[in-house]
Image (spheres, rainbow, N blue to C red):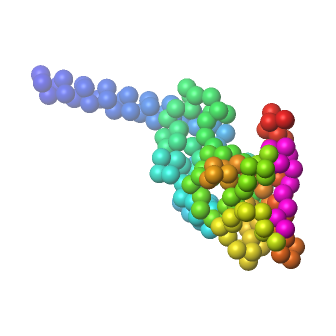
């Protein structure tokens, strides 16, 4: 009798687990993202490490969407089990885009993870922060603006992307160009955000 009850209990448990698996697969069919495979994960993690000296926290996983321009997002681990109950467009952090010409880091990465990066960071002054939030570019003539850059010019020529910080708080991300001893930072803050700041 006890053995029969135990068998019935295990059968019910197995059926429930099978239903959960099928529901997860059904949810993922509607989920517009694809989980990174081992090779993709290593590639993106390598880009983030080389460019920013950044490692994605263990409680996040990489997902992508798109074909011609592939967007890369960081989602909490296990997100596939909850996609039927959550508004996915409000979850996760977009970290960058892989174009034909190469990788582009986006502002959302700067905002969420900028304080965890230790390379290609430029500490700026309060007056410069105001210029950035007004939508302006920045000129650093002879690097004499009391700024501190965590990479050298040789590295800048390779990556060009720079995160600006103020008192170590991430402010913005943009492209840096070099002309002799002068550096010019091109503002890439989203227009929607700039309109809100004005």
Query: Which residue is nearer to you in this view: 79 or 4?
Result: 79
What is the total number of numbered labels drawn onto the structure image? Answer: 0
Query: x, y percentage for residue 158?
Result: 74, 72
Q: Viewer-proximal residue, 68 or 108?
A: 108
Q: Is the residue 181 above or below the residue 82 in the image? A: below
Q: Relative to 99, does residue 20 appear above or below in the rendering?
A: above
Q: Residue at x 78, y 63 (%)?
A: 145
**Is any part of residue 70 visible from this angle?**
no
Judging depth in this view, the residue of 66 and 175 nearest the camera is: 175
Quarter holding the N terminus is: top left
Q: Please tell me whether residue 1 belongs to the stretch shown in magenta.
A: no
Q: Is residue 120 left or right of residue 1?
A: right
Residue nearest the viewer, comparing 181 with 42 = 181
**Can the viewer see residue 31 in this picture?**
yes
The verdict on residue 134 being magenta is yes
Residue under the image location 85 percent in, 43 percent down:
134
Q: Please give left or right for residue 14 compared with residue 108 in the image.
A: left
Q: Is residue 59 above or below residue 176?
A: above
Q: In which quadrant will I find the C terminus?
A: top right
Q: Quadrant of residue 178?
A: bottom right
At which x and y percent is residue 42?
A: 56, 63
Q: Which residues are magenta?
A: 131-141
Q: x, y percentage for residue 43?
A: 61, 64
Residue 78 in picture, x, y percent from top left = 48, 40
Name which residue lies at 62% across and 28% down.
87
- Residue at x 44%, y 29% (from the top left corner): 19
């Amino acid at each position: 009798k006890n053995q029969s009850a135990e068998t019935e209990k295990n059968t019910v448990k197995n059926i429930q687990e099978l239903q959960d698996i099928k529901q997860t697969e059904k949810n993922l069919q509607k989920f517009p993202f694809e989980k990174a495979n081992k090779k993709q994960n290593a590639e993106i993690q390598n880009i983030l490490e080389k460019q920013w000296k950044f490692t994605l926290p263990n409680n996040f996983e990489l997902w992508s969407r798109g074909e011609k321009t592939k967007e890369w997002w960081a989602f909490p681990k296990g997100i596939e089990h909850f996609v039927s109950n959550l508004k996915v467009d409000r979850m996760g952090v977009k970290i960058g885009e892989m174009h034909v010409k190469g990788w582009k880091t986006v502002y959302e990465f700067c905002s969420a993870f900028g304080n965890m990066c230790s390379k290609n960071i430029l500490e700026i002054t309060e007056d410069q922060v105001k210029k950035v939030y007004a939508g302006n570019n920045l000129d650093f003539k002879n690097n004499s603006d009391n700024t501190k850059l965590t990479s050298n010019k040789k590295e800048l020529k390779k990556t060009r992307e720079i995160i600006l910080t103020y008192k170590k708080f991430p402010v913005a991300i943009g492209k840096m160009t070099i002309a002799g001893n002068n550096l010019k930072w091109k503002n890439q803050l989203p227009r929607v955000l700039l309109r809100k700041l004005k």
